Image (cartoon, rainbow, N blue to C red):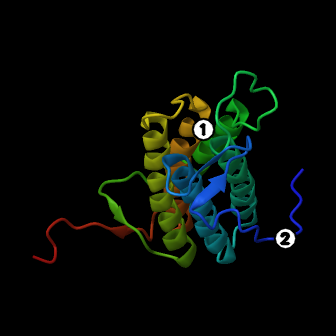
Amino acid sequence: MVKLNKIYTRTGDDGSTGLADGSRTHKDCFRVRAYGEVDETNSAIGVARLYMDNIELDRSLARIQNDLFDLGADLSTPTLDDDSKSLRIVQSQIDRLENQLDALNADILPLKTFVLPGGSKPAAYLHMARAISRRAEREVVAMSREEGVNPQINPLALKYINRLSDYLFVAARWCNMQGRTDVKWVPGKER
């Protein structure tokens, strides 16, 4: 259970931060950067939800926001020998995301060219969230390869963040009238 009585603790004034297992690390290490990017993804989704007029899609995004807190907790907890009490991303979260992605994609016109981020307001913000989630994915991969750190991370954490960017892309297209109002890329148009 999280209990925050005081927001500032002064314990990070030296450039360090606490991880979920009680250990401390630098605020710029790959682990902290990874869950920081997940937090930024979550914030961008929150902005997109301000403009969402579809109740079901909004509910789906709300569940994803909660999953992203789970993902942040997963990434902020180094792998332990007895990991049974750690909050980790599980396969059912990925399955739900894939099912929702497939349902949205079934309604969308097939792509014939790349699309530019934009169209409707919710689509533009979902594209922004997608780009941020791709950056988060790169940080999770970097974290898993960082020297001197236990490279064992929950493989489902990486799978979830990879699938999330796919979901956000499809959700953005769905918000653009199922792809009909996507902004199409025209190669070399402005030469």
The residue nearer to you, when weighing 188 against 89, is 89
Disc 1 + disc 2, Cβ < 8 Å = no
| Residue count near mark 2 (Cα–Cα under 10 Å), binned few <14, some 14–19, many ≥20 | few
Residue 165: percent from left, percent from top = 50, 51
* Residue kind at label 1, given as amino acid type: Ala
Residue 27: percent from left, percent from top = 55, 57
The residue at which mark 1 appears reads as 157
The residue nearer to you, when weighing 87 against 165, is 87
Q: Quadrant of residue 154?
A: top right
Is 136 displayed left or right of 154 in the figure? left
Q: Which element is circle 1 on?
A: helix
Residue 69, which numbered label?
A: none
Residue 6, which numbered label?
A: 2
Residue 178 seen? no
Q: Which element is circle 2 on?
A: loop
Is 49 displayed left or right of 168 in the figure? right
* Residue kind at label 2, given as amino acid type: Lys
The residue nearer to you, when weighing 145 against 106, is 145
Q: Which sits earlier in the primary sequence, circle 1 or circle 2?
A: 2
Residue 159 seen? yes
Q: Quadrant of residue 122?
A: bottom right
Is 145 displayed left or right of 73 in the figure? left
User: Farthest residue in the front direction?
Assistant: 14
Q: CA distance from mark 1 to mark 2?
A: 30 Å
| Residue count near mark 1 (Cα–Cα under 10 Å), binned few <14, some 14–19, many ≥20 | many
Residue 24: percent from left, percent from top = 64, 48
Residue 118: percent from left, percent from top = 43, 73
User: Which label sits in the foreground, 1 or 2?
Assistant: 2
Quadrant where the C terminus sits is: bottom left
Residue at the spot x=69%, y=27% of the render? 80
